[in-house]
Amino acid sequence: MKMSKMHLNTLREVPGEAEIPSHVLLLRGGMIRKLVSGVYGFMPLGLRSLRKIEEIVRQEMNAKGCQEIRMSAIQPAGLWMESGRWDAMGPEMWRLRDRHEREFCLGPTHEEIFTDIVRSEVSSYRQLPMNLYQIQTKYRDETRPRFGLMRSREFVMKDAYSFDRDIDGLDKSYGEMYDAYEKIFRRCGLVFRAVEADTGVMGGRDSHEFTALADVGESEIAWCPDCDMAATAERAEVNDAAPSSERELPLETVYTPGAKTIEEVSGYLDIPREKTIKALLFAVYEEKGRFREYVAAFIRGDRELNMTKLVNVLGVTEHMIVFADEEIMGAETGCVAGFTGPAGLRGCKIVVDSELTGQKNMCAGACKSDHHLLNVNYGRDYKADIEADLKRIREGDPCPLCGAPVRLARGVEVGQLFKLGTKYSESMGAYYKDENMKERLIVMGSYGIGVTRTLAAVVEQHHDEKGIVWPVSVAPYHAVIVVVKRDDKVQADLAEKLYRQLSARGVETLLDDREERAGVKFNDADLLGIPLRVTVGRSAVNGTVEYKLRRENENRELTADAAVEEAARLVREESHGAA
Ligand code: ATP
Ligand code: MG
């Protein structure tokens, strides 16, 4: 492609709303274009990179025998009612009505649609196992769309669904997808970790997330340097501190004026935070928005509550639970803002972190303004309706498997695998007949990759202060030829010749023949992150050019022929990624 003819609109300024490098650089490089919050279009260069990622995904899926199809984004509400997710999905689901007032959604995912396909088109064990996938646009009305393609409201996902005869089959299909995901993300040039994940609203048994490591990532993962433990921070188990051997002391009420937070109380009473109990108060609503109950959750004062663990033990989804208005809740339950403790509460569900049951003589709110209780003991002074691990893991906590200090890292969730089991085949009635003509439930898995998010994650991991540094495998073009003086015939002719030769050798090449100063062209080439730059300048009279890789600082003087050979080798070795 000749850049004088290409539609390219690079920006000098950093767009105001962009906070992270990938968002800034994709916008500045004119690769994506914002329409409204969380909705982006792809411009020529951005689209080429997106296509490359899609193609890597497609090749690795096909290599596992998966079959590509494409379903529509519009989905009838009825299927979601069958699975029970029409209400469970909450406000994130983009809902619409047709002219006959029939309800639809724009698919946030496609389990229901694919289950519908197999229940009507698969009947015999002979048709299983099977894995169908698509690379398709998804819609989620996210609470906080941000970071450009990272969390958008319209995005491209690869979603695959496996259908097996039994659990063993599912385990095998899941393993194949896990393997494919490792290949895909490696080929895209990402540094990533596969971690155990929560299954959330998907239901099912096992799940893994593939997380591209990045400081700006919204996912936190916990991993053990000494063993295999790796999990999302949401999912990671936290061991309880050893139970206390203290003797139980008599309950005592103390005056703690204005000491509402754990810091204030522990400071005022001069006791460590580990000896206090933190209260978190919630209101839970039915899926249809009707009030269900109040929940008071208690953890040790130095801990953070893990919201995912709480919603899981309550059996609700995140949009069904909100922080309670303590004034209103107080009238019914006796809680007092800043002074709530587990002893003396009524009329609400009490969820207690398992660790607290072993701790003795704790300090907790007295459910009375400006007062706390000392020597609060589980069993004697309060009881739980639910006892469970509610703790959020911290750096240095002992690994739940081996005890070594756990490490935390941040990253971007680029893909997730779920063992769905029979959740959808049961609710929607997807059966097959086995060898004995007996009806059995189809066993399912579902496997997503955020294709547009992967593109952003690649940029997040591959950039410097000048711009993007694309890995060859997903670069929009492999090489750019910069002509220093385009009205110098020798330079123009050599550039043209190189352009033809490179293209003929499979090197996807841009010819920067724009009427711009060389400096502008160099800056654009750096911003756009094209892996190889060949500069045709004054030494063209000697038949030599400057050969420079974007990821390296040095450049080399090569003959035009040698440059073509080198470029062809680069593309041959790296265009399929480092698989
Ligand atoms: P998240 O926790 O980040 O909201 P999710 O767990 O809800 O994501 P899945 O349902 O597992 O997402 O979807 C499969 C993949 O789709 C994710 O691994 C992610 O890469 C991508 N994805 C999900 N939501 C978005 C979004 N709003 N924008 C871009 N990609 C997304
Ligand atoms: Mg996910």
Image (spheres, rainbow, N blue to C red):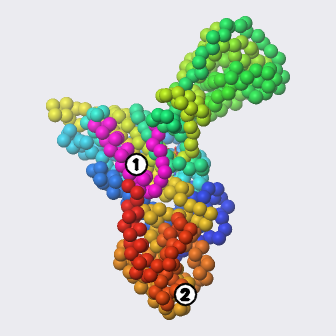
Residue at the image position 66 percent from the left and 10 percent from the top: 246
The quarter holding residue 525 reads bottom right
- Label 2 sits on residue: 538
Instruction: Count neighbours of disc 2 (C-alpha within 10 A) and say few if under 14, some if 14 to 19, many if 20 or more.
Output: some
| x and y, in percent, of residue 536 in the image | 51, 83
Specify whether tag 1 is near ligand 1 (CB below 8 Å): no
Residue lying furthest left in this view? Answer: 436
SS assignment at label 2: helix
Left or right of residue 349: residue 270: right
Is residue 565 visible in the rendered image? The answer is yes
12 to 85, vertically: above or below: below
- Label 1 sits on residue: 182
Taking depth in this image into account, of 543 and 8 the one nearest to the observer is: 543
58 to 300, vertically: above or below: below
Taking depth in this image into account, of 192 and 324 the one nearest to the observer is: 192
Left or right of residue 23: residue 367: right
